């Protein structure tokens, strides 16, 4: 679940989570294959460092070996595959940016895939013309992922957030360790239950397609000069009208509808059970048989997910459900 925070807390947590950056040649790490505590198993080691699975994945990708395939192999096969590494001179000579914290290696990235830091994202947000209009922030900061959302009252006036109302905002999603692209997406936020609704890239109108970013200069230029943050907020404000329509769009058998969408979007049984529970929660009872109630069940259940990635996935599905059930229809069906 993303935490409600203020700007000072965001800055502090970003500082605390900073990585040490090392420009190295991959072969200089002296990576080895060594037995693990599990009898007969082999795993990576690097002199003086502990490799996270994320760093191991980067090594395997350099070798062209799918990580999931690698981890299923017995030690004998791993040894044979590792012989390729011993002969891979070109790969060993690859310049790499290594990101560490204490003695743990969290990422081994090629120079052109280093990406944008969490601090740079927050700095850009603070430079935005709308920064002083944001009344609420949520943060999810973990070893391999970064999520920051900023919510405002309205674009037109200084209205403050009120419980029960829906507000536009922006959601930054990124990863300093190469696990995600950096993107800025519109969101709608419901204050009464702290639900966020992220609009996935695939559902955005053709005239509002957003790029992903790989370096700071393009990120800064397009977000600031392209007024991307105000555009996202305005887009979310316009799409908020669908919620008003959705309260008047009746659905038959909402439980069956939730089950169908969970299957369609490959959500497992525990997630579906969470959505079904939220369908009948206090905040949803009034609208349980409406498109609004079904969508709200997904966004409320998202808060109970174990990881930020899972939360964001379910929030995006909430918007796709609303898009399916309401689309551009008005309450009278026109």
Image (tube, rainbow, N blue to C red):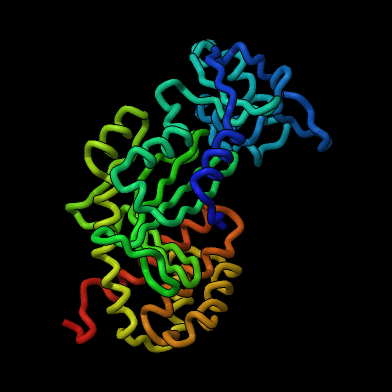
At 47% across and 56% down in the image, what residue appears?
Answer: 312
Residue 129 left/right relative to 191 = left
Foreground of the two, 58 or 212: 212
Q: Quadrant of the C terminus?
A: bottom left
Instruction: Check the image and report above or below for 183 versus 178.
Output: below
Q: Is residue 2 visible?
A: no
Residue 285, position in %: x, y? 49, 86
At 42% across and 56% down in the image, what residue appears?
Answer: 135
Instruction: Check the image and report above or below for 153 versus 69.
Output: below
Residue 277 left/right relative to 320 = right
Q: Residue furthest front?
A: 158
Residue 250 left/right relative to 194 = left
Dividing the picture into quadrants, the one containing residue 84 is: top right
Dividing the picture into quadrants, the one containing residue 235 is: bottom left
Foreground of the two, 238 or 327: 238
At 49% across and 66% down in the image, what residue appears?
Answer: 194
* Total marks placed: 0
Residue 124, position in %: x, y? 37, 37
Q: Quadrant of the N terminus?
A: bottom right
Residue 215, position in %: x, y? 36, 29
At 47% across and 72% down in the image, what residue appears?
Answer: 192
Instruction: Check the image and report above or below for 141 versus 63.
Output: below
Residue 55, position in %: x, y? 59, 30
Q: Is residue 248 visible?
A: yes
């Amino acid at each position: 679940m993303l935490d409600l925070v203020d700007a000072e807390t965001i800055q502090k947590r970003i500082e605390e989570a900073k990585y040490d950056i090392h420009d190295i040649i991959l072969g200089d790490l002296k990576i080895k294959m060594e037995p693990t505590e599990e009898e007969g198993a082999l795993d990576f080691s690097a002199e003086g460092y502990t490799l996270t699975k994320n760093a191991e994945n980067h090594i395997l990708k350099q070798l062209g070996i799918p990580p999931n395939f690698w981890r299923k192999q017995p030690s004998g096969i791993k040894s044979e595959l590792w012989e390729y590494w011993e002969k891979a001179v070109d790969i060993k000579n690859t310049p790499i940016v290594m990101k560490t914290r204490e003695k743990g290696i969290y990422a081994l990235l090629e120079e052109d895939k280093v990406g944008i830091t969490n601090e740079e994202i927050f700095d850009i947000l603070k430079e935005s013309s709308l920064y002083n209009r944001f009344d609420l922030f949520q943060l999810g900061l973990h070893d391999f992922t970064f999520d920051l959302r900023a919510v405002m009252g309205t674009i037109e006036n200084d209205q403050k957030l009120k419980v029960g109302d829906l507000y536009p905002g922006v959601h930054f999603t990124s990863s300093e360790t190469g696990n995600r692209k950096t993107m800025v997406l519109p969101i709608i936020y419901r204050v009464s239950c702290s639900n966020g609704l992220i609009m996935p890239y695939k559902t955005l109108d053709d005239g509002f397609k957003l790029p992903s970013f790989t370096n700071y200069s393009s990120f800064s230029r397009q977000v600031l000069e392209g007024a991307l943050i105000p555009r996202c907020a305005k887009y979310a404000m316009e799409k908020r009208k669908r919620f008003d329509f959705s309260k008047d769009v009746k659905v038959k058998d909402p439980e069956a509808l939730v089950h169908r969408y969970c299957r369609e979007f490959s959500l497992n049984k525990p997630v579906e059970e969470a959505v079904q529970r939220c369908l009948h929660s206090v905040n949803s009872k009034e609208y349980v048989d409406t498109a609004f109630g079904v969508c709200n069940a997904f966004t409320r259940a998202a808060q109970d997910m174990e990881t930020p990635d899972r939360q964001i996935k379910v929030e995006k599905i909430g918007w796709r459900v609303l898009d399916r059930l309401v689309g551009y229809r008005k309450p009278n069906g026109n």
